[in-house]
Image (cartoon, helix red, strand yellow):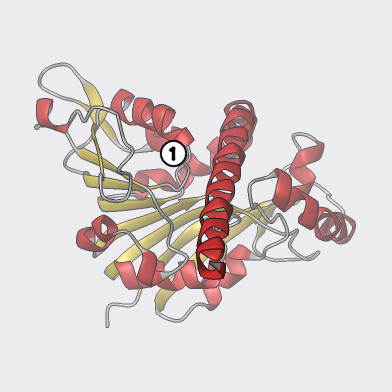
């Protein structure tokens, strides 16, 4: 009797947890529709510096709406379609844990000339229609539900696609439950000589940091302390986003790179920018 009661309670707990998680995901999607436009206005200038380098078999971790797809190399195809260049991008896998983002993610992929398909194993609830079968001459774009936090839980579709020429993170390592593990898994999934291209929110770099290319006279010490103070509440409101991680440094310290090059920026477009400086750059996996 007690055992049966415990089973029922466990099922009730799992149902409540799943429902609350879905509500949390939906709220984030609703807020991100607005906030993503503000974010793009701040960071697109830096994306344009490194996105054209993305090539080959690509995996993007936490793409959200994937609005940065427009900065990939595009061409006009024989049928007049303006699409991502199939000679540059061979395939694209979007690993995104929040299914409420998929509709707009799907639309953005199609508007950039990709053929969209879903991984039904990681997302069995999918009711979207694949476009891959009707546009076989275009680059495949596969939406997979999951993260890289734990290698043993990485969806099989992502593992099957490895090794990748390029793995991209764009404001996703700030929300990773275990950023060090995620970075190590990125290294594991890259081919030797492959690139991790990234742009991430970080804690204010220290004054005089030689990697800062735009300082804008920001009081780094003050705003860094404000980030530390805000981080716990921000992580709840921001769907797990920690604004005080030193992500550029964490990437650079990981074992397995041949080289890591990145820059820091202290934007001052608005007040929020002061608590969201950026690191962006590229890390190359060692060839041996």
Residue 109 in view (yes/no): yes
187 and 181: which one is in front?
181
- Residue to which mark 1 is pinned: 99
Residue 238, position in %: x, y?
68, 45
Name the one closer to the observer, 6 or 261. 6
Given residues 260 and 61, the one toward you in this image is: 61
Eyeballing the image, is 36 above or below 87?
above
List x then y, in percent, for residue 275: 77, 48
Query: Dot 1: within a 10 Å radius of its alpha carbon, few (fewer than 14), some, or many (20 or more) residues?
Result: many
Q: Where does the image place residue 131, in percent across and percent down from the top left?
A: 19, 28
Q: Circle 1 sits in a helix, a strand or a loop, which is it?
A: helix
Image location (x, y in percent) of residue 162: 24, 63
Q: Would you identify the image quadrant in which residue 161 lies?
A: bottom left
Q: Residue at x 43, y 27 (%)?
A: 104
Describe residue 264's horizontal placement relative to residue 110 as left or right.
Answer: right
Give the farthest residue toward the right: 222
Q: Is residue 266 visible?
A: no
Q: Is residue 180 left or right of residue 238?
A: left
């Amino acid at each position: 009797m007690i055992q049966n009661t415990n089973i029922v309670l466990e099922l009730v707990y799992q149902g409540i947890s799943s429902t609350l998680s879905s509500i949390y995901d939906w709220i984030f999607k609703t807020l991100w529709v607005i906030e993503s436009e503000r974010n793009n206005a701040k960071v697109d200038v830096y994306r344009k510096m490194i996105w054209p380098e993305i090539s080959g078999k690509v995996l993007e971790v936490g793409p959200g709406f994937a609005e940065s797809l427009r900065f990939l190399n595009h061409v006009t195809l024989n049928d007049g379609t303006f699409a991502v260049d199939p000679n540059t991008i061979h395939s694209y896998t979007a690993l995104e844990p929040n299914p409420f983002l998929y509709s707009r993610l799907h639309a953005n992929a199609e508007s950039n000339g990709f053929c969209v398909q879903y991984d039904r194993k990681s997302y069995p609830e999918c009711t979207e229609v694949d476009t891959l079968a009707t546009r076989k001459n275009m680059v495949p774009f596969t939406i997979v539900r999951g993260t890289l936090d734990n290698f043993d839980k990485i969806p099989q579709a992502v593992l099957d696609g490895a090794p990748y020429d390029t793995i991209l993170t764009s404001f996703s390592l700030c929300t990773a439950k275990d950023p060090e593990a995620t970075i190590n898994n990125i290294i594991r999934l890259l081919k030797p000589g492959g690139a991790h291209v990234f742009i991430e929110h970080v804690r204010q770099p220290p004054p005089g940091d030689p990697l800062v290319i735009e300082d804008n006279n920001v009081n780094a010490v003050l705003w860094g302390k404000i980030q530390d103070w805000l981080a716990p509440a921000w992580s709840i409101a921001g769907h797990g986003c920690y604004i005080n991680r030193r992500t550029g440094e964490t990437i650079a310290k990981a074992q397995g790179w041949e080289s890591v090059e990145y820059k820091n920026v202290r934007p001052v477009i608005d007040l929020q920018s002061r608590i969201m400086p950026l690191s962006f750059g590229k890390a190359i996996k060692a060839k041996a």
